[in-house]
Amino acid sequence: MNKTAFYLIPLFIFIGLLTFLYQGLFSNPREHESTLLEHSVPEFVLPDLMDTQKKHTQDVFIGKITLLNVWGVWCTTCAIELPYLKQLQQEGKHIVGLYYDQDIDPDFGIKTVQRVQQEVNQTYSQLGNPYAFNIFDVKRNLSLDLGVTGAPETYLIDKQGKIRLHHIGDLNPRVWANKFAAIYAQLEAE
Amino acid sequence: MLKLLLVALGFLISVSSSMAMEDKFKFDDPKQAALFLELTKVLRCPKCQNQNIADSDAMIAIDLKRKVHELVSKGRTKQEVVDYMKQRYGDFVFYEPPVNSMTIWLWLLPLIFIVATLTWIIRSRKKVVQQIDHSQLEKAQQILERDE
């Protein structure tokens, strides 16, 4: 074997290792592929946040491209993304909220629904209401089935009720341009 | 003495924390209680990464603990609970990654490295032996004879 080539091997291994580790510096450890991609929204029967007599099921997602936004008034980042969601809604996007409350502990249930509705209305009056309606995930069972890790998170659901994108973190113009715009346009064409 | 005290204190803390968990999540069957403790140690919190759901106080970890409690109470096995979580939160949620085309390299690379290095060492040793051939020995003999 050629001597120089032989002694260059460690250098190449080193460069390979360096590239691998350097990439790791910029990767987001919170980002991992959702297991539900290309799957239908899990089955559920949950009340509407503002009218708890009314029930929603997974069928509400059929027929329309939907942005399902997981949020709560206690979530600071959600308050920051709300005005941008309002803008998206004004552009004609169909946004559905998946609301869950931190203080309603399924084991105890401290807060009344009226109190939650009051808080939500207060937030709307300050920041606007981008939602067509809100699904009230009382015991956070749907969140668990959807693989929600915390608010805010947004799902892009196609006309057949299939999940096509799962974004962890807030929605803003940059995220929309990089992550959502292309898929959204594709779904509109379908 | 101080060491003994610290050990005693550590023991007390560990006992009280596991007791706190048992307080909140009750089981009729001690086997299920043990399975619950085992599962909460090997399931990873999706929000506060690098913590298991037993240690984490994030809401999602509490929800997952409640779900594990529910499933274990229903008599599900360890594998069934792990599969349930993986289905929702991916392989990521379990502290034991599966062997697949990506992760196999974690085991293969060190093995390849060891085998390659060993072959290299053995081969270079053989070369040293081969280099001393008869003509060289004869030459050495001649030099020795000349000196005499």
Image: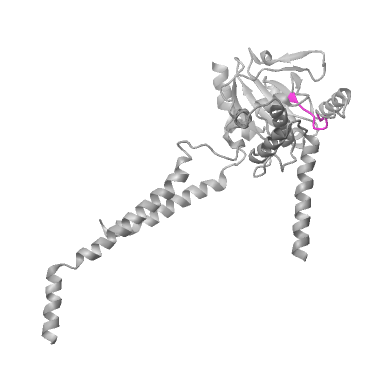
Compared across the picture, whether A25 is left or right of A10 comes to: right
Question: Which stretch did the figure color magenta?
Answer: A98-105
Q: In which quarter of the image is residue A152?
A: top right
Q: In this view, does A94 lie above or below B60?
A: above
Give the x, y percent position of residue A174: 62, 35
Residue in view at x 72 percent, y 42 percent = B56
Residue in view at x 45 percent, y 36 percent = B101
Compared across the picture, whether A30 is left or right of A73 comes to: left
Q: In this view, does A111 lie above or below B131?
A: above
The answer to if B119 sits in the magenta stretch is no
Give the x, y percent position of residue A149: 68, 34
Q: Which of A185 and A35 is in front in this view?
A: A35
Q: Nearer the viewer, residue B51 or B138?
A: B138
Placement of the N terminus of chain A among the 4 image quadrants? bottom left
Counting the numbered discs, the total is 0
Residue in view at x 74 percent, y 21 percent = A131
Give the x, y percent position of residue B49: 65, 42
The answer to if A100 sits in the magenta stretch is yes
Q: In this view, does B81 lie above or below B56?
A: above
| Colour option used | one colour
Give the x, y percent position of residue A41: 64, 20
Q: Which of B81 and A171 is in front in this view?
A: B81
Residue in view at x 63 percent, y 40 percent = B42
